[in-house]
Amino acid sequence: MRKIITVLALLFAMIGNLHVIEASSYGWGYKKNNDNQVPEIGKYQAMLEKYNAYYADLSGKKNIYLTFDNGYEEGYTEAVLDVLKKEKVPATFFVTGHYLKSEPELVKRMVKEGHIIGNHSYHHPDFTIITKQAIQEELETLEAAVARITEQKDLKYLRPPRGLFNEQTLKWSNELGYIHVFWSLAFKDWNVNDQKGWRYAHEQIMNQVHPGAIVLLHAVSADNAEALSHIIKDLRKQGYQFKSLDDLVLKETVPKALYGL
């Protein structure tokens, strides 16, 4: 009996030290439409509002927020940055530890040219199966690495790896001082072996665009790099303005602070 108790005690101790937990998991998604309206997100809406997370600008204004996920490099980010610089458009780049280590000069350029670096975690784990401590380590490790090579000393925007989340991860990230940023416009652009030409990328954006769109693009896409200039010019012709995530958050938080909400 004493041996059994000892074994059980050891097992519980081992379990207690694991960085893995069990919790429900959601993959970010929304009801896609082609009628230039903000897509519906159902039950997710209440969760995002509760924990100060974003997927779109709901003001109704014709603002666009460009965001890029950068997990690795395929040679197109420089071209993307060239277009953004020429067109004077701000963007947020959500990077991983791998990207930071392999492409430090590109990350430096992003910050130097006025773009925001967002936190996509250091090792790209599923946040819904790890502890709050492990999430904190992922975020702080990446933040420190960015601070070592750029003038951006803190990261405040978080995009969870693979878009996986639950109410617990939203709560924990909020407590750690991060703002979750999902998206309201995206398409299958990440498969480097299934690029369909710049017109396809342009068509996907123009068909789904809506006031307040937070656009998710992957910088590994040759189509996106080639289409970006066309997209920016054509959206401007439709009256859209390109804003940064800082503009969105400031616009949302200042009125609340003024009115004590």
Image: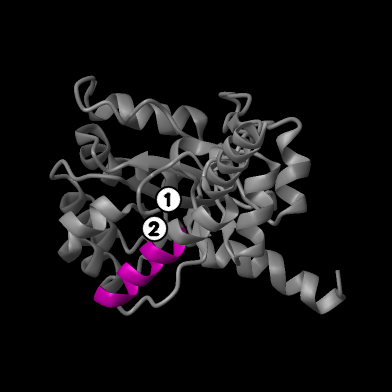
Q: Is residue 111 magenta?
A: no
Q: Which mark is residue 66?
A: 1
Q: Look at 51% across and 45% down and name the residue there.
A: 18
* Figure coloring: one colour
Front one among 7 and 169: 7
Any part of residue 114 in sight: yes
Three-letter amino acid code at the position of disc 2 = Ala
Residue 103, percent from left and from top: 17, 57
Query: 141 and 29: which one is in front?
Result: 141
The crowd level at tag 1 (other Cα within 10 Å; few <14, some 14-19, many 20+) is many
Residue 143 belongs to the span the image colors magenta: yes
Q: Which residues are magenta?
A: 139-149
* Residue sitting farthest toward the left: 75
> SS for tag 2?
strand
Q: Which of the marked residues, 2 or 1, is nearer the chain's N terminus? A: 1
Identify which amino acid the numbered label 1 is placed on: Leu
For image coordinates 37% across by 62% down, the residue present is: 142
Is 125 or 41 nearer to us in this picture? 125
> Where in the figure is residue 116, as x and y percent of width and height?
40, 65
Question: Which label number is shown at residue 91?
Answer: 2
